[in-house]
Amino acid sequence: MPGVTKHIYDHEISDILEMWNKQLKEISMILPQEYTEKDIISLMRKYYPHEWMSVIYKYNYYEIKDRYLKKRFGKKRYCMSKPEKLFRTVSQYKKIMNPNFRKQYFINFNSVEKTPTSFRW
């Protein structure tokens, strides 16, 4: 059954990306007015520490596997990206970091702040 372990790895990566997609949808609501990549990653680590650590554990696991395979057979199998680099491939992250989205978010953030203060009974 060739490729079984590689398919398991691919399925784990897709699960990670799907999990991060859902989490980023929730985090996108609490981003500051002007945010950077570091802000997003720090919020992910703050609000989802267990999930972030599970990805780090998987990264370390596959790195150990790849080192063994390289030493024994001369070729890596998994080549898992570091968690921060893998995080940049999430579709929701790409959307949030899009300059047009950031500009629109900045404008909407301001309008939400001004509305309660300008409205008087």
Image (cartoon, rainbow, N blue to C red):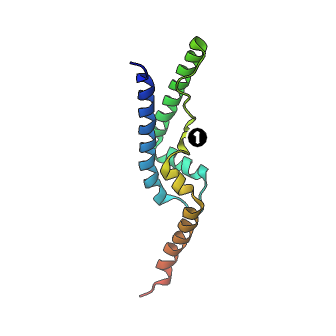
Q: Is residue 33 visible?
A: no
- Quarter the C terminus occupies: bottom left
Q: Nearer the viewer, residue 23 or 116?
A: 23
Residue 40 pos. (x, y %): 55, 51
Q: Is residue 99 visible?
A: yes
Please say if 100 is above or below 81: below
Q: Which of 28 and 89 is in front in this view?
A: 89
Residue closest to the far top: 72
Residue closest to the far left: 1
Using the rendered view, name the quadrant where residue 74 is placed.
top right
Please say if 103 is above or below 54: below
Residue 26 pos. (x, y %): 43, 54
Task: Check disc 1 and give the amino acid type.
Answer: Lys
Residue 20 pos. (x, y %): 45, 45
Near mark 1 (Cα within 10 A), the count class, few <14, some 14-19 or many ≥20, is few
Give the residue at x 57% y 62%.
Answer: 102
Residue closest to the far front: 2
> Dot 1 corresponds to which residue?
85
Residue 111 pos. (x, y %): 51, 75
